[in-house]
Image (cartoon, rainbow, N blue to C red):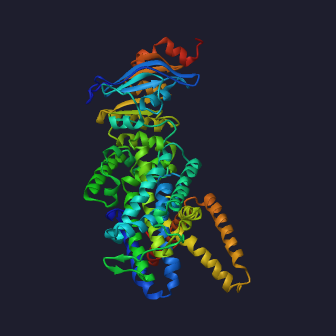
Amino acid sequence: MMKPVFMTYTKKDLINLAVCMVLSVLVIPTFITTEYWYTSILIPWLCLALATIGQQIVMGYTGQLALGAAGFMAAGAFAMFNLILRVPDLGFVGSLIVSGLIAAAFGILFGLPSLKVRGIYLMVATLASQFFIIWMIDKFGWFKNYDSSGIITAQDIVILGKPFTTPLAMYFVCLAVTTVLTLLAMNMARGSTGRNWMAVRDMDIAAESMGVSLLRTKVQAFAISAFYCGVAGALFAFCYLKSLEPVAFDIKLSFKILFMCILGGLGTINGAFIGAAFILLFPVLLNAIGNNVFHGAIDATIISSIEQVIFGGLMIIFMIYEPLGMAKLWENIKQKWKTKYPTMNIKNLVSSIGKKS
Amino acid sequence: MAQERKFKIGKPILEVKNISLSFGGVKAITDTSFDVLEHEVRAIIGPNGAGKSSMLNCINGIYKPQQGTVSFKGQQIPNITPNIMAQMGLSRTFQNLALFKRMSVLDNILVGRRLHTKTNFLEVAFQLPKVKKEEKMNRDRSEEIISFLEIEDIKDTPVGKLPYGLQKKVELGRALATDSSVILLDEPMAGMNVEEKRDMCRFILKVNDELGTTMVLIEHDMGVVMDISDRVVVLDYGKVIGDGTPDEVRSNQKVIDAYLGVEH
């Protein structure tokens, strides 16, 4: 195992981070000029990856089957809307943090059942958060500022007096928030906090006998998870949807995040990015195939059905053959590559590009 | 043990009084009392189903006995939970291995340092200097335990991939990492070959000798028990049928009957 050189990051992590930063800050903005890439792929990718990290914390690291990520995202998004509207002094970053904290409060509330129920039963219990939060926002007009149209336009993002309204600027906002929170999540996952989570996941009685409090650890994981989802939800609404509607945060989104988490690889941070990229890009790819290979001969509805079928199949295949998901698959490929070509220098570069964190 | 011990056997550190435990109609333990002295190696033996593991689970707070009390370090503990006992300085291993399977050996042992970790998750997230200091301290101690148990070469291996004998060793290491004054070992040598057993005995005695940790162990192998323990308590059908030094126990008629299967 390599020794960390800065915080909990090894030299390899820092190289990966540097490569990712060069790619995302210099290369992408220089070479990608079509708005479509920012507004429809990169921004939602970053937002959903962040939410998936939240899901990873509670499910991949702490082993609590939770299904309500979109509910916490909704809490974060509407908290953000109300904070900018009612407490403008907080500023964008301040509001973002407070929105996360409000979502975290919901996380604590809906994480409490995890002390008594586990597995699939907990999943059902956490569904309550999904439905309760959406219901609450719909029921009380105050959350939507008594807007009758149902869809509220999100306010413009203003940081330190400067507007961030172009797709590129919003992309940078998402990138900055996601990077910082990812680095913090890595510190937690690799430090004593993460060890407590994993101890609870792998053997709770033994963890308790070592002095790990189940109550504190589980509730903490739910709170942090909801914080990440809340921030992701706020970014999702303000940078991607540019509007606020509870319907956008329905159970389908929760499932999407769950799939990202599982396909990416439970208990990995980079898996969150891989899983989110896969689930977002796969439909785009299928559409492209439909349009370019079959020249529109296949109906769009059939393509979206095929998409569902393939996702379902993949979930089953991964659950059986590689429960640790694509992140692990990638590790294995790298390992094979290394043993096959032990002296190749390009391997460092290849591994850096593919591995986000 | 002929040579002088660094840590002399002292006063009772753990006292179990009149414990009765039943699951529905099945009586696992009936009115059992015994004590454990500071710095001693105390064995609990008995045939299968005698209530030995249940006894440890009562001491550790995993089971709640219907009657009886457990006193630790002179204090009677009213509401025992594994967590409270851990905080008071009592650690344990489990019969069927309760390791964190997907974590490395080092990480498993580091979880044992939980009670020596005072920093919270925010401090960990931002890796404040005091987190680094504490982490280094805990890692150094864990490395010490790893080299003490002679498992340096596997420290980065996920525990789930290790053979049984090594996993038992890691579990001992995790219990040691807590720096507890009493360690309960639930069948530390079950399923081991002769060589592994000898190794384990050596470690148990070494820990007791060098750190003065009080060891309470459950074991099936009578030869091993008689060799390493200072005192032995024998359970049968949830009752104490013998208590004393290995020699006393060996000549106890009730114990002989229980082990040879004489009708009661």
Name the residue at the right extreme.
A297
**Which one is in front, A174 or A217?**
A174
| Image point (38%, 66%), residue name | A83
**Which one is in front, A48 or B205?**
A48
A264 shown above or below A111: below
Q: Position of residue A142 (x, y in %)?
A: 46, 63
| Image point (46%, 63%), residue name | A143
**Which one is in front, A349 or B71?**
B71
Q: Is B256 left or right of B10, judged from the image as shown?
A: right
Residue A50 showing in the rendered view: no
| Image point (49%, 66%), residue name | A272
A77 shown above or below A223: below
| Image point (67%, 73%), residue name | A304
Q: Position of residue A134 (x, y in %)?
A: 53, 60
- The quadrant of the rendering that contains the C terminus of chain A is bottom left
A328 shown above or below A206: below
- The quadrant of the rendering that contains the N terminus of chain A is bottom left
Which quadrant of the view contains residue A207?
top left
A320 shown above or below A287: above
**Which one is in front, B4 or A264?**
A264
Residue B19 showing in the rendered view: yes
Count of numbered tags: 0
Q: Position of residue A22 (x, y in %)?
A: 39, 80
Q: Position of residue A178 (x, y in %)?
A: 41, 70
